[in-house]
Image (cartoon, helix red, strand yellow):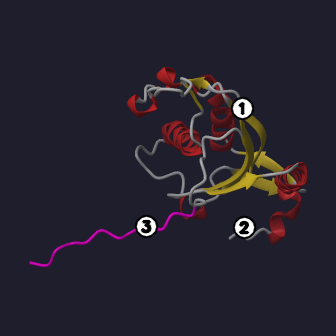
């Protein structure tokens, strides 16, 4: 009998970077199969579907779960979202419930939630709500991964913000518009 060897998945994250560092991150998350379940674009404006409204609400509700996360910008497109989120002030490591975050000699008992934790919670919570709304339990709403870019300067922040907010204007040329 042949042994099944699991595929090695290649990480698209920046090797060695601590994604729990305070800072701003530009995020793109696509729907599963690039299905247009979140809305439509008319006259360069996004018209959100009920599923899109649910996704928007889930995004802006994240600070209740992650007090150090600040949702800075968000545009929900028909089949993806673009967002800028900030990780700001630390939270007590004990509040995260992570045994590995226990302080060691000389280290403070504070930690930031890692970017992946925030995105995983968003995708999970919004998928549950969208599937409930659409009456389709346990269906994939989001693609498996997400795109992120670490914003390292005011200039990069301005570029990411402009790209995010102007995305509906460029929907006809958007590579996500399949």
Is disc 1 placed on a helix, strand or loop?
loop
Q: Nearer the viewer, residue 41 or 113?
A: 113
- Rate crowding at label 2 as few (under 14), some (14 to 19) or many (20 or more) other CA atoms within 10 Å: some
- What residue is at 60 percent from the left and 24 percent from the top? 91
The Cα atoms of the two marked residues, 3 and 1, are separated by 30 Å
- The picture places residue 3, in percent across and down from the top left corner, at 16, 74
Indicate which disc, 1 or 2, sits on the residue closer to the N terminus. 1
Question: Label 3 crowding class (10 Å Cα cut-off): few <14, some 14-19, many 20+?
Answer: few
Q: What secondary structure is found at the residue carrying circle 2?
A: loop
Mark 1–mark 2 Cα distance, whole angstroms, equals: 33 Å
Q: Are marks 3 and 2 in contact (CB under 8 Å)?
A: no
What residue span does the magenta drawing correspond to? 1-12
Please identify the residue farthest to the bottom as the structure is shown.
2
**Residue with the mark numbered 1:** 88
The answer, for residue 100, to whether it is visible in the render is: yes
Determine whether label 3 and label 1 are within 8 Å by CB: no
Which of disc 2 and disc 3 is earlier in sequence? 3
The mark closer to the camera, 1 or 2, is 1
Quadrant where the image shows the C terminus: bottom right
- The residue shown at (60%, 33%) is 112
Mark 1: give few (<14), some (14-19) or many (20+) Cα within 10 Å: some
Residue where numbered disc 3 is placed: 9
């Amino acid at each position: 009998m042949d042994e099944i060897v699991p595929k090695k998945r290649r990480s698209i994250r920046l090797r060695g970077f601590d994604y729990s560092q305070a800072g701003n991150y530009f995020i793109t998350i696509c729907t599963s199969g690039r299905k247009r379940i979140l809305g439509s674009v008319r006259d360069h404006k996004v018209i959100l579907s009920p599923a899109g409204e649910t996704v928007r609400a889930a995004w802006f509700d994240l600070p209740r779960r992650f007090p150090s996360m600040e949702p800075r910008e968000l545009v929900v497109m028909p089949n993806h979202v673009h967002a800028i989120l900030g990780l700001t002030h630390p939270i007590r490591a004990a509040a995260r419930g992570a045994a590995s975050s226990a302080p060691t000699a000389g280290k403070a008992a504070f930690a930031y939630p890692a970017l992946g934790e925030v995105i995983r919670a968003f995708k999970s919570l919004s998928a549950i709500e969208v599937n409930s709304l659409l009456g389709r339990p346990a269906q994939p709403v989001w693609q498996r991964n997400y795109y992120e870019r670490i914003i390292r300067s005011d200039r990069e922040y301005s570029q990411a913000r402009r790209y995010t907010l102007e995305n509906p204007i460029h929907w006809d040329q958007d590579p996500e518009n399949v």
